[in-house]
Amino acid sequence: MSKPLVIYDNDLAGDFDGTVGLAVLFGLEKEGLIELYGVGLSDVSYWGPIAVDNAIRAILKREIPIGVMFDKEPDLSPKTHAKASFDKFGAKISWYLCQDVVRLFRYLLATAPDKSVILISAGPMTNIANLLKSEGDEIIELSGRELIEKKVIKYIAMAGDVHVTEFKEYNVRCDVDAARYVFDNFPRDVPLIVVDFRVPLNTLTGDIFGKAPDYYPIKAQWEWFGDPEFKRPSWDPYATLLTHPRWDKWFKLVGPGKIHIDNDGRTKFVKGGVNQYYVEHKEGITNVHMRNVIHSIVERSFSD
Ligand SMILES: [Ca+2]
Protein backbone atom coordinates (compact mmCIF):
# COMPACT_ATOMS: atom_id res chain seq x y z
CA MET A 1 0.00 0.00 0.00
CA SER A 2 1.39 3.38 -0.89
CA LYS A 3 1.66 6.06 1.75
CA PRO A 4 -1.09 8.67 1.96
CA LEU A 5 -0.15 12.21 0.96
CA VAL A 6 -1.13 14.61 3.73
CA ILE A 7 -2.24 18.21 3.27
CA TYR A 8 -2.26 20.11 6.57
CA ASP A 9 -4.22 23.36 6.79
CA ASN A 10 -3.79 25.22 10.08
CA ASP A 11 -3.70 28.56 11.86
CA LEU A 12 -0.23 27.63 13.09
CA ALA A 13 0.96 30.97 14.49
CA GLY A 14 -1.90 31.08 17.01
CA ASP A 15 -2.22 28.34 19.58
CA PHE A 16 0.75 25.97 19.93
CA ASP A 17 -1.16 22.70 19.41
CA GLY A 18 -1.07 23.22 15.63
CA THR A 19 2.70 23.00 15.79
CA VAL A 20 2.58 19.87 17.96
CA GLY A 21 0.29 18.43 15.26
CA LEU A 22 2.88 19.30 12.62
CA ALA A 23 5.55 17.49 14.66
CA VAL A 24 3.28 14.41 14.80
CA LEU A 25 3.24 14.47 10.98
CA PHE A 26 7.06 14.71 10.99
CA GLY A 27 7.24 11.64 13.25
CA LEU A 28 4.80 9.68 11.09
CA GLU A 29 6.73 10.59 7.93
CA LYS A 30 10.01 9.50 9.56
CA GLU A 31 8.32 6.17 10.39
CA GLY A 32 7.45 5.80 6.70
CA LEU A 33 3.69 5.92 7.32
CA ILE A 34 2.72 9.13 5.48
CA GLU A 35 4.21 11.79 3.24
CA LEU A 36 3.66 15.44 4.15
CA TYR A 37 2.52 16.89 0.83
CA GLY A 38 1.58 20.50 1.45
CA VAL A 39 0.79 22.98 4.20
CA GLY A 40 -1.82 25.74 4.13
CA LEU A 41 -2.15 28.57 6.62
CA SER A 42 -5.57 29.67 7.79
CA ASP A 43 -4.26 32.66 9.73
CA VAL A 44 -2.39 35.70 8.42
CA SER A 45 0.69 35.84 10.64
CA TYR A 46 3.71 36.79 8.56
CA TRP A 47 5.81 34.47 10.77
CA GLY A 48 3.66 31.33 10.34
CA PRO A 49 4.95 30.18 6.94
CA ILE A 50 8.53 30.95 7.99
CA ALA A 51 8.22 28.78 11.11
CA VAL A 52 6.66 25.93 9.10
CA ASP A 53 9.36 26.14 6.43
CA ASN A 54 12.20 26.28 8.97
CA ALA A 55 10.84 23.19 10.74
CA ILE A 56 10.35 21.20 7.52
CA ARG A 57 13.85 21.97 6.25
CA ALA A 58 15.49 21.09 9.57
CA ILE A 59 13.50 17.92 10.30
CA LEU A 60 12.45 16.44 6.96
CA LYS A 61 15.47 17.87 5.08
CA ARG A 62 13.38 18.90 2.10
CA GLU A 63 11.01 21.63 1.00
CA ILE A 64 7.24 21.47 1.02
CA PRO A 65 4.98 23.99 -0.72
CA ILE A 66 3.21 26.38 1.65
CA GLY A 67 0.02 28.26 0.84
CA VAL A 68 -1.24 31.50 2.39
CA MET A 69 -4.39 33.60 1.95
CA PHE A 70 -3.10 35.94 -0.72
CA ASP A 71 -6.24 38.06 -0.66
CA LYS A 72 -5.30 39.22 2.86
CA GLU A 73 -2.47 41.37 4.20
CA PRO A 74 0.06 39.56 6.41
CA ASP A 75 0.11 40.49 10.10
CA LEU A 76 3.60 41.45 11.30
CA SER A 77 2.78 41.34 15.01
CA PRO A 78 5.74 39.73 16.83
CA LYS A 79 3.55 38.24 19.56
CA THR A 80 3.65 34.66 18.33
CA HIS A 81 5.80 31.61 18.98
CA ALA A 82 6.25 31.43 15.17
CA LYS A 83 8.50 34.51 15.30
CA ALA A 84 10.83 32.71 17.74
CA SER A 85 11.73 30.38 14.85
CA PHE A 86 12.65 33.39 12.69
CA ASP A 87 14.62 35.01 15.52
CA LYS A 88 16.80 31.93 15.98
CA PHE A 89 16.99 30.44 12.47
CA GLY A 90 16.20 33.29 10.07
CA ALA A 91 14.04 32.79 7.00
CA LYS A 92 14.47 31.05 3.65
CA ILE A 93 11.03 32.15 2.45
CA SER A 94 8.60 34.98 3.01
CA TRP A 95 4.81 35.41 2.83
CA TYR A 96 5.30 36.90 -0.63
CA LEU A 97 7.16 33.82 -1.88
CA CYS A 98 4.40 31.45 -0.79
CA GLN A 99 1.56 30.47 -3.07
CA ASP A 100 -2.12 31.28 -2.86
CA VAL A 101 -3.47 28.52 -0.66
CA VAL A 102 -6.49 27.53 -2.77
CA ARG A 103 -4.42 27.52 -5.95
CA LEU A 104 -1.79 25.42 -4.17
CA PHE A 105 -4.36 22.90 -2.90
CA ARG A 106 -5.87 22.67 -6.39
CA TYR A 107 -2.44 22.04 -7.90
CA LEU A 108 -1.52 19.43 -5.27
CA LEU A 109 -4.81 17.59 -5.71
CA ALA A 110 -4.61 17.77 -9.51
CA THR A 111 -1.17 16.15 -9.57
CA ALA A 112 -1.88 13.49 -6.89
CA PRO A 113 -2.99 9.96 -7.80
CA ASP A 114 -6.70 9.23 -7.35
CA LYS A 115 -7.72 8.59 -3.73
CA SER A 116 -4.25 9.27 -2.33
CA VAL A 117 -4.65 12.43 -0.24
CA ILE A 118 -5.70 12.93 3.38
CA LEU A 119 -6.89 16.49 3.88
CA ILE A 120 -6.69 17.98 7.38
CA SER A 121 -7.94 21.32 8.62
CA ALA A 122 -7.15 22.28 12.19
CA GLY A 123 -8.01 25.95 12.12
CA PRO A 124 -10.80 28.09 10.67
CA MET A 125 -12.28 26.31 7.63
CA THR A 126 -11.91 29.31 5.30
CA ASN A 127 -9.43 27.66 2.95
CA ILE A 128 -11.37 24.40 2.68
CA ALA A 129 -14.59 26.29 1.92
CA ASN A 130 -12.79 28.32 -0.76
CA LEU A 131 -11.27 25.14 -2.19
CA LEU A 132 -14.73 23.55 -2.38
CA LYS A 133 -16.11 26.66 -4.11
CA SER A 134 -13.23 26.91 -6.61
CA GLU A 135 -14.05 26.39 -10.26
CA GLY A 136 -12.06 24.77 -13.04
CA ASP A 137 -9.06 26.79 -14.17
CA GLU A 138 -5.81 26.48 -16.15
CA ILE A 139 -4.50 23.94 -13.61
CA ILE A 140 -7.34 21.47 -14.21
CA GLU A 141 -10.91 21.72 -15.45
CA LEU A 142 -12.35 20.01 -12.36
CA SER A 143 -13.99 22.11 -9.67
CA GLY A 144 -12.62 22.00 -6.14
CA ARG A 145 -15.50 19.77 -5.12
CA GLU A 146 -14.80 17.34 -7.99
CA LEU A 147 -11.09 17.34 -7.18
CA ILE A 148 -11.81 16.41 -3.56
CA GLU A 149 -14.17 13.65 -4.68
CA LYS A 150 -11.53 12.17 -6.98
CA LYS A 151 -8.34 12.60 -4.94
CA VAL A 152 -9.18 12.68 -1.24
CA ILE A 153 -9.37 9.50 0.88
CA LYS A 154 -10.78 11.31 3.91
CA TYR A 155 -11.02 14.78 5.37
CA ILE A 156 -10.21 15.31 9.05
CA ALA A 157 -11.42 18.54 10.64
CA MET A 158 -10.62 19.75 14.14
CA ALA A 159 -13.80 21.70 14.64
CA GLY A 160 -16.81 22.22 16.86
CA ASP A 161 -17.97 20.63 20.06
CA VAL A 162 -20.49 17.85 19.61
CA HIS A 163 -20.51 17.02 23.33
CA VAL A 164 -21.37 20.44 24.79
CA THR A 165 -23.61 21.87 22.11
CA GLU A 166 -23.86 25.36 23.73
CA PHE A 167 -20.08 25.78 23.40
CA LYS A 168 -18.85 27.87 20.46
CA GLU A 169 -15.59 26.24 19.44
CA TYR A 170 -12.86 28.59 18.17
CA ASN A 171 -12.23 27.19 14.65
CA VAL A 172 -15.94 27.26 13.82
CA ARG A 173 -16.55 30.60 15.55
CA CYS A 174 -13.72 32.26 13.56
CA ASP A 175 -15.49 31.64 10.26
CA VAL A 176 -19.00 30.31 10.83
CA ASP A 177 -20.02 30.73 7.19
CA ALA A 178 -17.02 28.74 5.95
CA ALA A 179 -17.62 25.93 8.46
CA ARG A 180 -21.29 25.70 7.57
CA TYR A 181 -20.50 25.75 3.86
CA VAL A 182 -18.05 22.87 4.29
CA PHE A 183 -20.36 20.68 6.37
CA ASP A 184 -23.28 21.36 4.01
CA ASN A 185 -21.42 20.92 0.73
CA PHE A 186 -18.68 18.36 1.30
CA PRO A 187 -18.89 15.49 -1.23
CA ARG A 188 -20.81 12.61 0.33
CA ASP A 189 -18.47 9.99 -1.12
CA VAL A 190 -15.58 11.25 1.01
CA PRO A 191 -15.72 10.63 4.78
CA LEU A 192 -15.53 13.81 6.86
CA ILE A 193 -14.18 13.02 10.34
CA VAL A 194 -14.42 15.57 13.12
CA VAL A 195 -12.07 15.86 16.08
CA ASP A 196 -14.14 18.03 18.37
CA PHE A 197 -13.07 20.33 21.21
CA ARG A 198 -14.00 17.97 24.02
CA VAL A 199 -12.26 14.63 23.31
CA PRO A 200 -8.62 15.89 23.17
CA LEU A 201 -9.13 18.50 25.92
CA ASN A 202 -7.43 16.60 28.76
CA THR A 203 -4.62 15.08 26.69
CA LEU A 204 -1.89 17.63 27.37
CA THR A 205 1.17 17.64 25.11
CA GLY A 206 4.06 19.82 23.99
CA ASP A 207 6.52 19.64 26.90
CA ILE A 208 8.36 16.87 25.00
CA PHE A 209 10.09 19.66 23.03
CA GLY A 210 12.24 20.29 26.12
CA LYS A 211 14.07 17.10 25.04
CA ALA A 212 14.47 18.13 21.39
CA PRO A 213 17.92 18.88 19.97
CA ASP A 214 18.82 22.59 19.72
CA TYR A 215 18.74 22.58 15.90
CA TYR A 216 15.04 21.64 16.07
CA PRO A 217 13.20 24.92 15.28
CA ILE A 218 10.01 23.94 17.13
CA LYS A 219 12.03 23.76 20.35
CA ALA A 220 12.70 27.52 20.03
CA GLN A 221 8.97 28.09 19.47
CA TRP A 222 8.14 26.06 22.59
CA GLU A 223 10.79 27.87 24.66
CA TRP A 224 9.20 31.20 23.68
CA PHE A 225 6.41 30.46 26.18
CA GLY A 226 9.01 30.57 28.97
CA ASP A 227 7.63 27.66 31.00
CA PRO A 228 9.47 24.29 31.21
CA GLU A 229 6.08 22.61 31.85
CA PHE A 230 4.28 24.35 28.96
CA LYS A 231 1.72 22.10 27.27
CA ARG A 232 -1.63 22.41 25.51
CA PRO A 233 -4.67 20.23 24.87
CA SER A 234 -4.05 17.92 21.89
CA TRP A 235 -6.74 19.24 19.56
CA ASP A 236 -4.60 19.43 16.42
CA PRO A 237 -2.33 16.45 17.29
CA TYR A 238 -5.46 14.26 17.42
CA ALA A 239 -6.35 15.41 13.91
CA THR A 240 -2.90 14.54 12.56
CA LEU A 241 -2.80 11.25 14.49
CA LEU A 242 -5.87 10.14 12.51
CA THR A 243 -3.63 9.88 9.42
CA HIS A 244 -1.90 6.90 11.09
CA PRO A 245 -2.83 3.68 9.24
CA ARG A 246 -3.74 2.13 12.62
CA TRP A 247 -5.62 5.10 14.07
CA ASP A 248 -8.29 2.63 15.14
CA LYS A 249 -6.00 1.41 17.94
CA TRP A 250 -6.99 4.58 19.82
CA PHE A 251 -10.21 5.95 18.32
CA LYS A 252 -13.64 4.82 17.25
CA LEU A 253 -15.89 6.66 14.83
CA VAL A 254 -19.39 7.74 15.76
CA GLY A 255 -21.73 8.11 12.81
CA PRO A 256 -22.52 8.43 10.03
CA GLY A 257 -24.43 11.65 10.50
CA LYS A 258 -24.31 15.33 9.80
CA ILE A 259 -22.81 18.30 11.62
CA HIS A 260 -25.18 21.25 11.86
CA ILE A 261 -23.95 24.75 12.72
CA ASP A 262 -26.11 27.59 13.98
CA ASN A 263 -25.54 31.28 13.25
CA ASP A 264 -23.38 31.77 16.34
CA GLY A 265 -21.12 28.79 15.68
CA ARG A 266 -22.61 26.11 17.92
CA THR A 267 -22.31 22.61 16.50
CA LYS A 268 -24.68 19.68 16.72
CA PHE A 269 -24.25 16.15 15.39
CA VAL A 270 -27.38 14.47 14.03
CA LYS A 271 -27.16 10.79 13.13
CA GLY A 272 -28.31 10.07 9.62
CA GLY A 273 -27.29 9.25 6.11
CA VAL A 274 -24.51 11.74 5.41
CA ASN A 275 -20.86 10.57 5.47
CA GLN A 276 -19.75 12.62 8.53
CA TYR A 277 -18.39 11.23 11.79
CA TYR A 278 -16.79 12.31 15.02
CA VAL A 279 -14.22 10.44 17.09
CA GLU A 280 -14.26 9.10 20.63
CA HIS A 281 -11.48 7.35 22.52
CA LYS A 282 -11.77 3.61 22.28
CA GLU A 283 -12.77 1.80 25.45
CA GLY A 284 -9.89 1.82 27.95
CA ILE A 285 -7.88 4.55 26.18
CA THR A 286 -6.88 7.24 28.67
CA ASN A 287 -5.58 10.79 28.26
CA VAL A 288 -2.24 9.70 29.72
CA HIS A 289 -1.99 6.90 27.17
CA MET A 290 -2.71 9.31 24.32
CA ARG A 291 -0.20 11.83 25.68
CA ASN A 292 2.45 9.07 25.60
CA VAL A 293 1.45 8.01 22.07
CA ILE A 294 1.73 11.58 20.77
CA HIS A 295 4.99 12.29 22.56
CA SER A 296 6.59 9.06 21.36
CA ILE A 297 5.67 9.87 17.74
CA VAL A 298 6.98 13.44 18.12
CA GLU A 299 10.18 12.06 19.67
CA ARG A 300 10.80 9.97 16.55
CA SER A 301 11.10 13.24 14.63
CA PHE A 302 14.07 14.27 16.84
CA SER A 303 16.42 11.65 15.37
CA ASP A 304 18.35 12.10 12.12
CA1 LIG B 1 -5.10 25.10 15.00
Image (cartoon, rainbow, N blue to C red):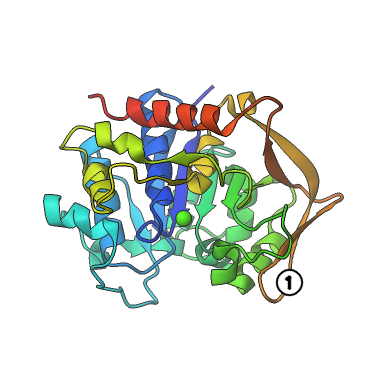
Quadrant holding the N terminus: top right
Can you tell which quarter of the image residue 92 is in? bottom left
Q: Is residue 116 above or below residue 79?
A: above
Q: Is residue 174 above or below residue 147?
A: below
Can you tell which quarter of the image residue 95 is in? bottom left
Q: Is residue 37 above or below residue 163?
A: above
For mark 1, give the secondary structure: loop
Q: Is residue 37 visible?
A: no
- Who's the residue at 24% across and 63% down the image? 97
- x, y percent for residue 76: 25, 73
Q: Is residue 178 left or right of residue 95?
A: right
- Who's the residue at 50% across and 66% down the image? 137
The amino acid on which the numbered mark 1 sits, given as a three-letter code, is: Asp
- Who's the residue at 60% across and 52% down the image? 197
Residue underneath mark 1: 262
Quadrant holding the C terminus: top left
Q: How many marks?
A: 1
Can you tell which quarter of the image residue 214 is in? top left
- x, y percent for residue 261: 72, 67
- x, y percent for residue 163: 72, 52
- Who's the residue at 33% across and 62% down the image? 99
- x, y percent for residue 67: 37, 59
